[in-house]
Image (cartoon, rainbow, N blue to C red):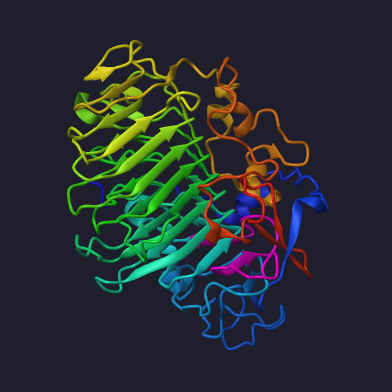
Amino acid sequence: MSRRHLLLSLAVCLACVALTIATPAVAAAQRVAFTALHTYYMSPTGDDGNSGTSPSSPWATPNHSRLVCGDVIIAAPGNYRQAWDGGLVVNSQPSDCPSTQGGIDGTGGIYFVTVLCNGNIAKCYVQGSGNAGGMVSLEASNWAFEGFGLYSDTIGNGGMRGFEAYACASGTTVLHHLAFVNDVVAHANTAYDTNECAMNHNVPGNGTDYWAVVGSIAQNANDDPICLAAIDDVAPANHDTKAGVHVFVGGNFALNNQNPACTVSDGEAIMFDTWDAHGYVGTGVIENNIMYSSAWANLQVLMSSYNSSAPNIQVFDNTSYHSNVCAPWNGYASGGMNFQLNGQFPWTVDAYNNIDDENVATAGCFGEGAIYAMLIGGNSAGPGRTVFAAGGSGIHNIFHAVYGSCMSTCDPGNNVSAWNNFSYGTNTYESPGFANTSDLMANHMQIPYACRSYTNTTACMGWNDSTQKAAANSVIADLTPTASGTSGKGYQPPGACKPDPYYPTWLKGIVYLQWDGTNLWEYNGLVQKPCGL
C-alpha cells in the first residue's frame, strides 16, 4: 500500500521576503565547545582537487577518503548541485566510528562526519530539478547534515526528494547512523526518507538503521506520486540488535504537507512504514513534533504482513492539528494519528501525552470519510502479538474530533475509533483550545524562507530560548493549548537539560552545531536534550 506551484526562484524569494527579525542573542551558558578531530571546508565553487583545509581551498563535495567520525566540514553559503548533477551524492565511508577523543567533552563518542552550513539555516541550499531521487543522496553511513535548505522546482512527477538514505546498492546494503539536524526541506516529493527500493521482503534484507531527523522543517514535502510521508522511515533493516533507540524523529515541524494525487494511500506528515519488511527489532521514537494540515493522517505507524518483527515504538509529546485535508477514503474512517496494525507480530506501540485536534468532520477535497483524532486499525491483537497502549493515568492524550458518529468502537464523544478488538486506552476527550488556529492557517502554511534570518528552526517557529517564551502569532504560540488539564501535553519547547530515556546517546555532541569563524559550538535551544549530550 505504501511504497511509495512551481517554486519561485530562490533569489527572487530572498528579495521579496522581509527578513527583519534577527535571531535573539544566545548566552554563552547555552553552548559548549565542540572540538573537531579535523575541520574541512566546502563551497559551491569548490573543487575536490583542493586541499579542503581552508576556506580559500574548499572542496566541492564531502566525498573524501581521509574522513573520520568527529570531523566537521564547514559549508559556505550558496547553491549546491543536487545529487543527480554530480553534486551531493555522499558515498564516502568515514572511518574510526565512533570517535574516541574530541567532541564536547574530550572523550569523543561522535558517530558522524558533520556537514555544517556556515551561518543561518538554509543559507546553504540545493534547488532541485528533474526527477532523479534525492537532492542529497546518502549512500554511505555515519553522516550528518545541519543547517541546509532543500527546495524542488517542481512537485509530483517532475519533483525531487530531499534528504534520502539510499540503501539500494544491493539486497544486503544496510546504511546506519544518518542524521538531519536543523534543516529545512520545502516543496519536495518527500523531505527526509529512507529508501530500500523495495528490493526484497526478507531478513536481514537491505535498508537503514540508526536514523534521525531532529529539529527540522518539512513543508509541502510529501508530493511524490507514489505517495509518501514528508518524514518517512520505510522498511528499516537491522545494523545490529543493541538495546536503545535506533530511530529518532524529534522536535520537527511538518506543515501543509498536502498531496492531492494520493487518493488511495499515504500523504502523511510523519510515518513509520512497514517495519516488518526485514524483520526489524529496533526501538523507534516519534517525540515532540508539531504537525498540521497533511493530506492524510498527520502521523501514521503501519504494520504490513511480511516477516515477524518486534520493534518498540514510542509516540509521545506530539501536537497534531487539522489532518486529512485531501483524502477521499470512500467513506472509510481515518485519524489524525493513525495506527494501522494488523496485530500478527509482537510489536509494542505506546502513544501518550499527545494532542490531536480535528476541526472538520470529513476529509477535504472529496468530503468523504470520518475523521477521528486517533484511529487504531487492523486485525485483532492476540496473545503474544501487538500490544498497543494509548494514554493512561498521568500520561493521557488529549483527543478531540467533531465527526459525531461512531464507526467500530469509540469513546462516548466519538473522538477516537478502535477496530477489531484494539483498545483506544484512557485519555481525555476535549478541545485543547489552541491559542490561535486562525493565524496558523492564514499565515503559517507557506515555504518558510524567513527562517534564513535565524540560526535554528525552533526559533523560526517562534521560540525565544533566552526568554523561554514564544513570539505572538508564531507556529509554537498558535498551537499552545489553553484548555484546563492540557499543561505538559503535546509539543514542549526546549529548556534546561533534563533526563530523556528516549533521546539517542549516538546523537551526542551534534544537536545543534554552529561555527563562529574560529570555533565550533554545540548549542541548546533547538530541541530538549539530556544533560551531557
Quadrant into which the C terminus falls: bottom right
For residue 274, side relative to residue 181 (left or right): left
Majority secondary structure of magenta residues: loop
- Res 164 quadrant in image: bottom left
Q: Is residue 495 visible?
A: yes
Q: Residue furthest front?
A: 383
Q: Is residue 362 above or below residue 449?
A: above
In percent of the image, x 56 and y 80: which residue is there? 67
Q: Is residue 270 visible?
A: no
Q: Is residue 275 above or below residue 206?
A: above
In percent of the image, x 44 and y 46: which residue is there? 285
In percent of the image, x 78 and y 45: which residue is there? 24
Q: Which residues are magenta?
A: 103-127
Q: Is residue 123 magenta?
A: yes
In percent of the image, x 69 and y 28: which residue is there? 472
For residue 9, side relative to residue 238 (left or right): right
- List x then y, in percent, for residue 185: 51, 52
- List x then y, in percent, for residue 518: 79, 70
Q: Is residue 375 above or below residue 258?
A: above
Q: Is residue 172 magenta?
A: no
- Res 466 quadrant in image: top right
For residue 105, side relative to residue 212 (left or right): right
- List x then y, in percent, for residue 242: 40, 61
